[in-house]
Image (cartoon, grey):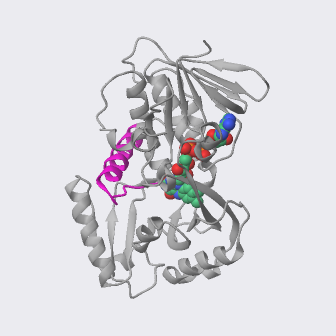
Amino acid sequence: MDAEVIVIGAGIVGAACAYELSQRGLQVLVIDDGPSGATPAGMGHLVVMDDNPAELALSSASLAIWRSWLARMDSGCGYSHCGTLWIAADDEELQAAADKQTRLQAAGIGCALIQPQALAALEPALRSGLAGALQVGSDGVVYAPNAARWLLGQSGNDTGHLKNAGSISVLHAQVRALDDGRVYLSDGSARSAPHIVLAAGLRASALCPEVPLQAKKGHLAISARYPGMVRHQLVELGYVKSAHECSGTSVAFNVQPRLTGQLLIGSSRQFDSTDSAIELPILARMLRRASDYLPGLGALQIIRSWTGFRAATPDGLPLIGPHPQRCGLWLALGHEGLGVTTATGTAQLIAAGICASASALDGSAYLPARWLQSV
Ligand SMILES: Cc1cc2nc3c(=O)[nH]c(=O)nc-3n(C[C@H](O)[C@H](O)[C@H](O)COP(=O)(O)OP(=O)(O)OC[C@H]3O[C@@H](n4cnc5c(N)ncnc54)[C@H](O)[C@@H]3O)c2cc1C
């Protein structure tokens, strides 16, 4: 036995699972051939999403866990408590903002409708004529690749209630196959553990072909430093619609102020591409959309753009829990565009499952058996 748990994947989900398991006193071996995957390519917006009750429960519980972890994290993790402004362009979107406020408040999440004049004072760079916004103050931003590195660098429990300190060791290697309790590496060696957590993102399909994952390509761009130009994560309310489309290409205004003073500009979604190349027409469409809301954007220097792939499931909810047919295999997959946010709740559910302990979060909506039972 090489560990009590093997985690395949050191993106934000695998790293969070390893951290939570080690906090419970387990010896964890993380295997990754990266850095690659969605974590270094994403935005790191920690955001409560409420398109359905299961998404709201997971994202809001996850944010609470993030807040408890962030208190211990180092400054490299780039956490900022900037909150989100959901921008309403017209009266219809203002109504959508009010409906969202009702749902969030019912879940105990503080938020406030912002009138146009107050919005202009909060974010002077936004264009005039907007109908208002919904401000969600508890949302934030993290620099996910560094947060993952920080999580993997922690061993044992740092809260002091467990007697047995757990550990995390990281092996840089490619997993080429899995069977019960064993992973086979591309150098011909194998590692074994009673529990294996598959947190390999989109590439999990190569190891477990029955998982229903589909790539959703996204473009992002980052500016030079313009400190103070934008103060909150700014997202158009139309984002929710584009985020849940099931085909084609969509873009939405989504801009994030980084602690460096840079603006991270998104976002696009494409179903019809698995090519990581930047597609200039889509990048241009995305930047035009952002300029519609932030007219000064055209004068900024964009220093880099890139693409990444979100791993989407057919129902938009992640797969978290035991594989119903493969003994000892746990899935932590399919987090789509919300995996940085929901990594913490995922880790809590996986650790509670492996340790057979209770979890404050009800994980039944995310169980892989909803898609894998008839395989
Ligand atoms: C453009 C874009 C914007 C996004 N914005 C946000 C956002 O604002 N907020 C948010 O919450 N989420 C966002 N996301 C989603 C988020 O980034 C992902 O859901 C999350 O990073 C997934 O993390 P993961 O650990 O599951 O997978 P990954 O980050 O893909 O990590 C998987 C790891 O497994 C390793 N691996 C895979 N196969 C093997 C193998 N066979 N052997 C060894 N190692 C292997 C890979 O090298 C990789 O390191 C965004 C994503 C994109 C693409």
Seen from the viewer's position, the closer of residues 160 and 43 is: 43
Q: Residue at x 39, y 27 (%)?
A: 353
Image location (x, y in percent) of residue 13: 52, 40
Q: Is residue 305 left or right of residue 212?
A: right
In the image, residue 350 sits, relative to residue 372, either above or below, namely: above
The segment highlighted magenta reads: 45-68
The answer to whether any part of residue 143 appears in the image is no
Seen from the viewer's position, the closer of residues 53 and 253 is: 53
Seen from the viewer's position, the closer of residues 199 and 150 is: 199
Q: Is 55 included in the stretch rendered in magenta? A: yes
Q: Residue at x 60, y 50 (%)?
A: 38
Q: Is residue 86 left or right of residue 36?
A: left
Seen from the viewer's position, the closer of residues 245 and 283 is: 245
Image quadrant of residue 209?
top right
Extreme-right residue of the structure: 187
Extreme-bottom residue of the structure: 129
Where is the N terminus found, in terms of image quarters?
A: top right
In the image, residue 250 sits, relative to residue 319, either above or below, namely: below
Q: Residue at x 64, y 44 (%)?
A: 203
In the image, residue 127 sits, relative to residue 17, either above or below, namely: below
Q: Residue at x 77, y 30 (%)?
A: 186
In the image, residue 114 sits, relative to residue 190, either above or below, namely: below
Q: Is 49 included in the stretch rendered in magenta? A: yes
Examine the residues drawn in magenta and state their main secondary structure.
helix
The answer to whether any part of residue 357 appears in the image is yes
Image location (x, y in percent) of residue 157: 45, 21
Image location (x, y in percent) of residue 102: 21, 64
Image location (x, y in percent) of residue 256: 51, 64
